[in-house]
Amino acid sequence: MLIKRKKGWELPESAATPEALFRDRRRLMKGLAAGSILAAMPGLTACGSEAAPMKDPSASLYPAMRNLRYRVDREMTAEELATTYNNYYEFGSHKNIWRAAQSLPIRPWTVTLDGMVEKEQQIAIDDLLAMVKLEERVYRFRCVEAWAMTVPWTGFPMRRLVEIARPLSGAKYVRMETFKDPSIAPGQKQSWYPWPYVEGLTMAEATNELTLMATGIYGQPIPAQNGAPIRLITPWKYGFKQLKSIVRFTFTDERPKGFWEEIQGREYGFWANVNPEVPHPRWSQATERLLGPDTRVPTLLYNGYADFVADMYKGMEGERLFM
């Protein structure tokens, strides 16, 4: 008799919020919150002094079909929380940077693919979106600061981007960097930070099925504060690895040194895989605070995605895989 053993990420349908219910709830929440949110956002009011955020020309691509292979056993984080409680050091070091981030122009936006590739190329974001198939995935998100959320991202597998780039066989890593424009991003005027924000993945990590190039969230184009128009999502890693508003992907045979690793290598390493047993030098990672209910729950190894990613790190006991 064949006995099927469930993997850690497989859940019964009852454990996930039904999509239709989630969509209806999201519309209800948006309707209820519209007045208070608009009042709090000068750029979205008729009489405000700030310009309204640029309309995303890709809006017709959303919502995308949800891929039920990627779902979690936690309640979805409210959209209002996930889009207003953010880290984005380009616009400031506080959590309430979503207003300042509205100054980010999302068009024109060009992504450069260079380094060890067959042919270097620049692709406008809307041309890139025409080359891929978008889908929605519900992922856990874990910040190194020990808070967490559950978010429905829309995007496409990074392995598709790798296929478009056509890297040479000697390429071992993908180095990514975000935009750099101090005229719109006041945080980039702080010279003690090594701008632009840089992060990197191994080729195995970049082509892992979980790795997502996110362009949307909650069934609509991703807003500036969450990384518009394109950001990285690697849900088994801490959030500082998942850089926002990417403009360059460089394929290389040298391991990239990330933004936070450059600033404080003792606290932030290259791998940054989630592990409850390995504390940050200044706080424990054994538990995490869920946004919304504001309750603490146990942290899961690889943020609950060990079945997808653990094999990539076998035989690497000498590496500092966690933090």
Image: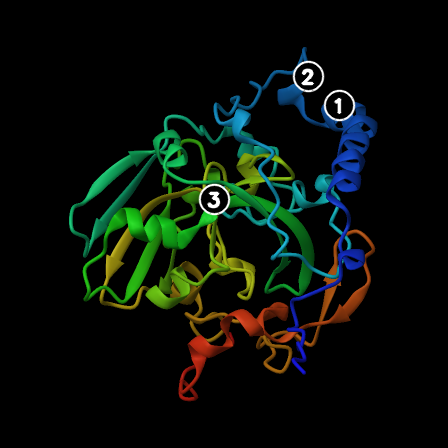
Instruction: Measuring from the top left, give residue 239's x and y in whole percent.
Output: 55, 59
Q: Which residue is outermost to the front?
A: 1
- Label 2 and label 1: CA atoms lie apart by 7 Å
Q: Which residue is outermost to the top?
A: 47
Instruction: Measuring from the top left, give residue 260's x and y in whole percent.
Output: 44, 62
* Mark 2 or 1, nearer chain start: 1
- Which mark identifies residue 39? 1
**SS for dot 1:** helix
Q: Residues within 10 Å of mark 1 (few under 14, many from 20)?
A: few
In the image, what residue occupies the spot 58% across and 19% down?
Answer: 50
- Which mark identifies residue 222? none
| Residue picked out by circle 2 | 45
In the image, what residue occupies the spot 44% across and 68% down?
Answer: 264
- Label 2 and label 3: CA atoms lie apart by 25 Å
- Label 3 and label 1: CA atoms lie apart by 25 Å
Mark 3: amino acid: Glu
Instruction: Measuring from the top left, give residue 193's x and y in whole percent.
Output: 41, 54
Mark 1: amino acid: Ala
Residue 91 as seen in the image, left or right of residue 270: right
* Residue 195 visible within the image: no
CB under 8 Å between discs 2 and 1? yes
Q: Residues within 10 Å of mark 2 (few under 14, many from 20)?
A: some
Task: Return the residue nearer the eye: 61 or 227.
Answer: 61
Mark 2: amino acid: Thr
| Residue picked out by circle 3 | 90
